[in-house]
Image (cartoon, rainbow, N blue to C red):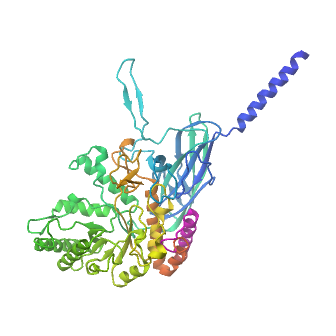
Amino acid sequence: MKNLSLPILIATFLVFDACVKAAEKVTVKLTVLNSMERIAQNQEPVGETQVHIKAARNEVESFQVAVSAIDENIKVVKVAVSELSGKDGKISKENIILFREEYVRARKSSPRAELPPGLYPDPLVPFINPVTGEPIEPRSESREKWGAPVVTKGFEMYAVPFDVWKGHNQPIWVDVHIPNDTHAGIYKGTFTVTLKNNTTASVPVTVTVWDFTLPDGPTHKNHFGTVQNAGRFFGADPKSDKYRDIAMRYCKLMAEHRINPPLPRNLLPSMNSDGSLKITPEHHEALKKFIMDFHVTDFEIPRAPVKDATTTNRDKAARYYQGYHQYLKENGWDKRSYIYMHDEPNLKENYEEVLEHGKLAHQAAPEMRCLVVEQTYLQDPAWPDIDPAVDIWCPLFSFIDRDSINAKITHGDEVWSYTALSQRAPRYHPDYEKVKSCDPPYWHIEQPLTAYRVPTWINWQYKITGLLYWSTVTTVIDPWHNPAFSHFGVHFNGEGYMIYPGAPAGIDGPVSCMRLKNIRDGMEDFEYFALLEKSAGREAVTKIVSTVAPEWWNSAKDPKAFNIARDLIAEEILKSKK
């Protein structure tokens, strides 16, 4: 018996040591990130250990949780956020939407990119198909028996289950919508991840609801293009019901992100042969419903659909504009509409066209507003001055000039801003020597997410009242696998689209992305500015906005700066209510 005691002791020690090591093994780690951060797949997760977000009523606030495999590969089979409970009520699960962040590869750098090529989280794959209301099943193949045909089920893009390899991350995006009837206060819940072996990991979630409410539609005017390319990815005929349903879902997604969706062309009045307007009652009622349901605050109306509108068909075009303005006025839409008259008139003859078309529109309907995508100063002193024709100027981010903007505003015009590609200031910029090497916030995947949030802050600083982007659904080869828009052979990753086609996830409609979410947050920030301005005046807002965006060429890139400023504005709004 004495000879056996030493081996038994050794074996007991080895078993005990193995148990201790097993207990010390960390399988999964959860790291909380804010909505302006990104985490690479193999990056060391650095962030918070609990969620704390703040929002007004009728606002959507987001957070991220990076799921990281520490000591071994893991498979996640479930992700959930509980109901959020507070002293005076609850925020139900129906108001909490979860997405898995998919990574896309930027193979070549966009011009003036701030970040290198590589994999970036961007498209947000929902856990629940928003069209069917069912979970999205992963793609699988099976046979009933050997030799039988292969049966394929599910889809390439899905949210859960997912694998995370040791030393890697998979971030989850969470949207929390605060309903209008939510009482101000603190609401708490839990974010939980369940692994295949039934191990769970959780982080606490705290939501502070502020005692004020955002309006339904955007205060900051905007135009983000059409959705006419959307059906291409779904094999839908533009004249089919399927196409119209898909297009309507794209419009709904835009509205949910405080972007004015384009009015459906099939619902707009058409033109009779003499230029007068043909209004179909059923189309008119459907248009009214569209504007009301999607909280459309401003919109484009079509240019006169005739050739030679300023010459041989001038009378017909004038009758069209006259009738259209009357139609808009009768429905209370005249102050919210504009003619998108010309996009970047870069030639002398383009300037002459703008001048003639603006004269035509204003003679037919003096209160009709005309928008031209052009800077607020002359491109060439030898060209005609288009000021009489333009009511809304829309310069590129890098073409912004404060003095000429102020002059146009003083004159009674409105100024918007817009971005496309990555152009710097032109040589004819009034302050060219100062700004020629400066970069505004370009909108490409390899830019910080703050680039998408900050434009409304800078616009406030310059008294710019609108934001324009040329497209959210431009045609690229396949945005999920090749996110580059090519312009004269130059690649711009993410250019011209903020919405992914849902077809690879089995969704007959759109899929949002992290960039679009940050544009939405910027639009919501502007609602805060407008609310505080009403109670405390413009200067009170500008003082805080200046800590983030003192000028176009110098804005914050640290997410904390935005959150600190937003908290300050909220505090001032709350003070004004007492």
* Total count of labels: 0
In the foreground, 348 or 156: 348
In the foreground, 462 or 476: 476
Which residue extends farthest right? Answer: 2
In this rendering, position of residue 135 left or right of residue 11: left
Across and down, in percent, residue 132 comes to 36, 43
**Image quarter (top left, top right, bottom left or bottom right) of the C terminus:** bottom right
**Image quarter (top left, top right, bottom left or bottom right) of the N terminus:** top right
Q: What residue sits 19% from the left and 71% below the top?
A: 324
In this rendering, position of residue 460 left or right of residue 562: left
Q: What residue sits 18% from the left and 72% below the top?
A: 321
Answer with the quarter of the image where residue 208 lies: bottom right
Across and down, in percent, residue 374 comes to 33, 72
Q: What residue sits 21% from the left and 60% below the top?
A: 267
Q: Does 487 appear in magenta?
A: no
In this rendering, position of residue 349 left or right of residue 80: left
Where does the magenta region start and end?
A: 550-571
Across and down, in percent, residue 486 comes to 36, 53
Across and down, in percent, residue 575 comes to 55, 76
Q: Does 568 appear in magenta?
A: yes
In the foreground, 76 or 171: 171
Location of residue 531 with respect to 26 vertically, above or below: below
